[in-house]
Image: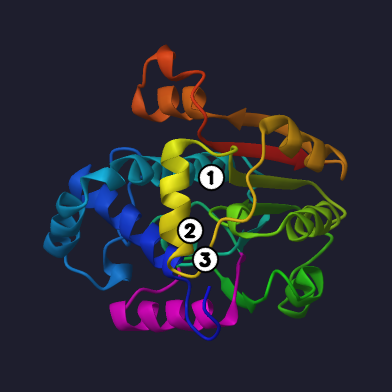
Amino acid sequence: MIEGEPSRTAWAAALHRAAHQVVDSGRVFPDPVAVPITGWSSSRVAQDALEHPRRRGMRAFIACRHRYARDVLAGCDPQAQVVVLGAGLDTTAYQPGSLLLGPVCEVDHPATQRWKRDRLEEAGISATVPTVYVPVDFEADDLTRALVAAGFDRARPAAVVWLGVIVYLTRPAIEQTIATIARLTTARTDLVLDYGEPATLSSDRRAQAVAALGEPWLSRLAPHEMAELLDAHGLRVVEDLGLAGWGSRYLGLPPEFANRPSGHMLHAALS
């Protein structure tokens, strides 16, 4: 991201979630605050989506990864503290009727976090569970120290949501963050993340587009590489879904998609 400015890819992800509500009727990931948090009207969101039909695949992936995270959180200890890493305009803490008990700790770059809080205030959106904002630069700051300073209890279970971030980090930053997550609590920790497989033609086009925004993709991993990274720090892969998995589960895609490289959604645990 550009120094001093909020993440442009966080905005793009939020717009995809909003478009999913308007164009796809929130079929996979219903979210009543996805449109208001963008500051755009439903009609403007719909028009933007119709003007960019090639975004449909990414919109589907983003809707599915958030639905997957919601499903994982639903199965976690209700007393777990939820940590959203690289929160962007994530709406986990702002859902009416949420079953989460909190607290939710939103962790992000200071500039992006200030931008989000301005958006929330302008849209009149309030958190529905106790929420704390933890400004962190993932490449430079101590994540555990920042969380503890914000009130995180290392003796309680945690559920960590890490979406749309790994691809923008260097390999050392990914490894360091995984090591930190593994040591985050003395109780059970659940982790849900997404990551991208090595390059395909379509993913290279997307990589070029985000690089032009000043936020290049830096890391893509094969499934065995991600499993090895997690295992090295004691995190067990509960489930790793490629396109065949999440596509059939949430979109009803047929089996012939099974061998296509794609973004992955993964649940790991340390107990």
Please, is residue 180 above or below residue 246 in the view? below
Residue positioned 40% across, 84% down in the render: 118
Region rendered in magenta: 103-127
What secondary structure is marked by label 2? helix
Report the amino acid beneath label 2. Thr
- Front-lying residue, 201 or 247: 201
Q: Is residue 98 visible?
A: no
Q: Is residue 34 visible?
A: yes
Q: Which residue is mark 3?
A: 215
Q: Which residue is mark 2?
A: 92
Residue 119, position as x, y percentages in the image:
37, 79
- Picture quarter containing residue 247? top left
- Front-lying residue, 243 or 79: 243
What secondary structure is marked by label 1? helix
Please, is residue 198 above or below residue 34 in the view? above
Query: Marks 3/1: CA distance?
Result: 24 Å
Q: Which mark is residue 69?
A: 1
